[in-house]
C-alpha cells in the first residue's frame, strides 16, 4: 500500500480534487455544500462554481482522464440551471470568471457553444459594465457604475487578451489594453502592489485597507495574457514585479497570511497560484525571480500537504500552517486544489 511519503504530487492533486466531492458533495442542483460540515446553502456562489470548472479542467489537462472534463461540463450546466438558464448576473467579475472557465472548456473540448458563450459574456460586460466614469474601464456591478476595481478589470483583461488570439475582431485587444492601462494608472503602486478598488463610496478614494492576494494574482494574469497576445515582454516585467511584491507584502516568505475565514476570501490565494503558474511558464527557470517564486510554491504546498491530511483525504483551512478548523468553506478547498495542481504541473517540468 502506498504510504503518505510515497504519494507523487500528481496523486496529491487528485486526492485534493476527490476530497472536494467527499467533504462537500451533495445530490441535486446544489452540487456542493457551501461549507463542511454542511450549513447554510441559501447563497448561490456563482463565482466559486466558475472556479470549480477551472479546477476540474486542471485535473483533465494533468491526467487526460475525460471524467474530469465531464465534471467540468456538469458544473457549467449547474450554473446555468441555478441561474434560470442565463449566463448573466449583476456582478461583472462573476460573469468574467465564468467566461474564462467556459473558454477553457472550449479549448479542451472544441465545442463551439462554449466559445460563443464566452464571447456573449464579454459583449454583455462591455454593453452594461464599460463606462468612462473615473476612466474607461469596467464597473464592479450593474448597480454601481461609479465603482471600479481590480476584481472586475483584471479578469476582463485576461478574457479580452485570450479572445483576441486568432480572432480578427480587434475590439478584444483594444478593450483589454485600455482596461490594463486604467488598472495600472489607477490601482497599481510604484512597487507593483495592486489595490482593490476606487470610488466605492463615491468619494474618489482608493480602498487602501483591502490588501489581497487576489488582486496581485489578477494583475499578474492580466500582464501575462497581454504579453502572450501581443508579444510585448514589458507586460511580463510588470507581472513579475507584482508577483514578487506580493510575496514581500503579504507572506512570511513561505506562506500567505490569512485574509479572512473562508467565504470569498477563501478563494483569493488560489487565484494568485493560478496566475503565478502562467508567469512561471514565461520566465527563464534560472532567473532570480523564477527561482524565488518556485521556492515559494514548493514551500507553501509542502506546508499545505503536511497540515491538511484527514485520513485518506485532504481538507484545507485558510492557514496552511495548521490543520483545518471545524468549519471550512468550499472556496477555501478550491484554493488548496489550485495550489496543488500548480505544484503537480511544476514537478512534471
Image: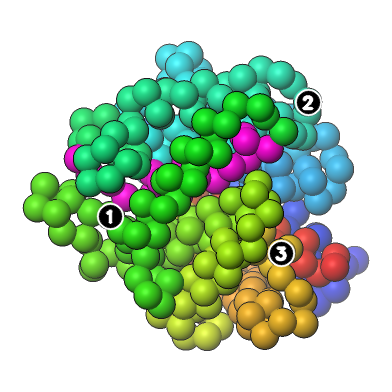
172 or 219: nearer the viewer:
172
Q: Earlier in the sequence, mark 3 or mark 2?
A: 2
For the residues bearing labels 1 and 3, Cβ distance under 8 angstroms: no
How many labels sit on residues?
3
Considering the image in quadrants, where does the C terminus appear?
Answer: bottom right
- Find disc 2 in the rendering and name its residue: 110
User: The magenta stretch spans which residues?
Assistant: 146-165
| Magenta-colored segment: predominant secondary structure | helix
Residue at the (58%, 70%) spot, across then down = 237
- Find disc 1 in the rendering and name its residue: 197
The answer to whether residue 21 is visible is: no
Q: CA distance from mark 2 to mark 1?
A: 36 Å
For the residues bearing labels 2 and 1, Cβ distance under 8 angstroms: no
Crowdedness near tag 1: few (<14), some (14–19) or many (≥20) residues, C-alpha within 10 Å? many
Is residue 155 on the magenta stretch?
yes
76 or 326: nearer the viewer:
76
Crowdedness near tag 3: few (<14), some (14–19) or many (≥20) residues, C-alpha within 10 Å? some
- Find disc 3 in the rendering and name its residue: 282
Q: Is residue 314 above or below residue 118?
A: below
Residue at the (71%, 48%) spot, across then down = 58
Q: Is residue 156 above or below residue 334?
A: above
84 or 225: nearer the viewer:
225
Q: CA distance from mark 3 to mark 2?
A: 25 Å
Which image quadrant is residue 144 in?
Answer: top left
Residue at the (40%, 29%) spot, across then down = 125
Crowdedness near tag 2: few (<14), some (14–19) or many (≥20) residues, C-alpha within 10 Å? few
Horizontal side of 110 relative to 265 (left or right) equals right
Residue that protrudes farthest toward the top in the picture = 85
Image position, residue 159 (x, y; %): 55, 39
Amino acid at each position: 500500500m502506498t504510504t503518505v511519503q510515497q504519494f507523487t504530487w500528481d496523486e496529491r492533486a487528485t486526492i485534493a480534487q476527490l476530497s472536494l466531492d467527499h467533504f462537500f458533495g451533495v445530490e441535486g442542483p446544489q452540487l456542493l455544500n457551501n461549507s463542511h460540515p454542511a450549513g447554510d446553502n441559501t447563497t448561490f456562489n456563482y463565482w466559486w462554481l466558475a472556479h470549480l470548472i477551472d479546477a476540474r479542467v486542471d485535473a483533465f489537462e494533468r491526467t487526460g482522464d475525460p471524467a474530469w472534463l465531464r465534471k467540468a461540463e456538469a458544473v457549467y450546466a449547474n450554473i446555468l440551471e441555478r441561474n434560470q438558464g442565463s449566463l448573466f448576473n449583476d456582478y461583472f467579475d462573476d460573469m468574467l470568471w465564468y467566461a474564462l472557465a467556459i473558454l477553457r472548456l472550449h479549448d479542451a473540448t472544441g465545442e463551439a457553444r462554449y466559445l460563443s458563450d464566452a464571447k456573449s459574456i464579454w459583449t454583455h460586460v462591455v454593453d452594461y459594465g464599460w463606462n468612462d466614469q473615473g476612466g474607461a474601464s469596467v464597473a464592479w456591478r450593474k448597480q454601481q457604475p461609479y465603482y471600479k476595481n481590480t476584481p472586475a478589470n483584471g479578469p476582463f483583461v485576461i478574457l479580452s487578451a485570450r479572445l483576441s488570439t486568432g480572432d480578427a475582431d480587434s475590439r478584444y485587444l483594444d478593450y483589454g489594453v485600455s482596461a490594463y492601462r486604467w488598472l495600472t494608472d489607477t490601482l497599481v503602486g510604484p512597487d507593483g502592489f495592486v489595490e482593490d478598488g476606487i470610488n466605492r463610496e463615491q468619494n474618489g478614494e482608493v480602498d487602501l485597507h483591502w490588501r489581497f492576494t487576489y488582486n496581485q494574482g489578477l494583475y499578474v494574469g492580466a500582464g501575462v495574457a497581454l504579453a502572450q497576445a501581443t508579444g510585448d515582454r514589458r507586460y511580463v516585467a510588470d507581472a513579475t514585479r507584482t508577483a514578487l511584491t506580493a510575496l514581500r507584502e503579504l507572506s512570511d516568505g513561505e506562506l500567505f497570511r490569512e485574509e479572512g475565514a473562508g467565504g470569498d476570501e477563501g478563494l483569493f490565494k488560489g487565484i494568485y497560484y493560478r496566475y503565478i503558474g502562467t508567469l512561471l511558464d514565461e520566465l527563464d527557470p534560472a532567473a532570480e525571480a523564477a527561482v524565488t517564486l518556485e521556492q515559494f510554491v514548493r514551500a507553501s504546498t509542502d506546508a499545505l500537504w503536511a497540515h491538511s491530511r484527514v485520513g485518506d483525504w485532504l481538507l484545507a483551512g485558510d492557514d496552511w500552517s495548521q490543520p483545518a478548523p471545524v468549519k471550512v468553506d468550499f472556496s477555501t478547498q478550491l484554493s488548496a486544489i489550485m495550489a496543488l495542481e500548480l505544484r503537480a504541473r511544476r514537478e512534471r517540468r
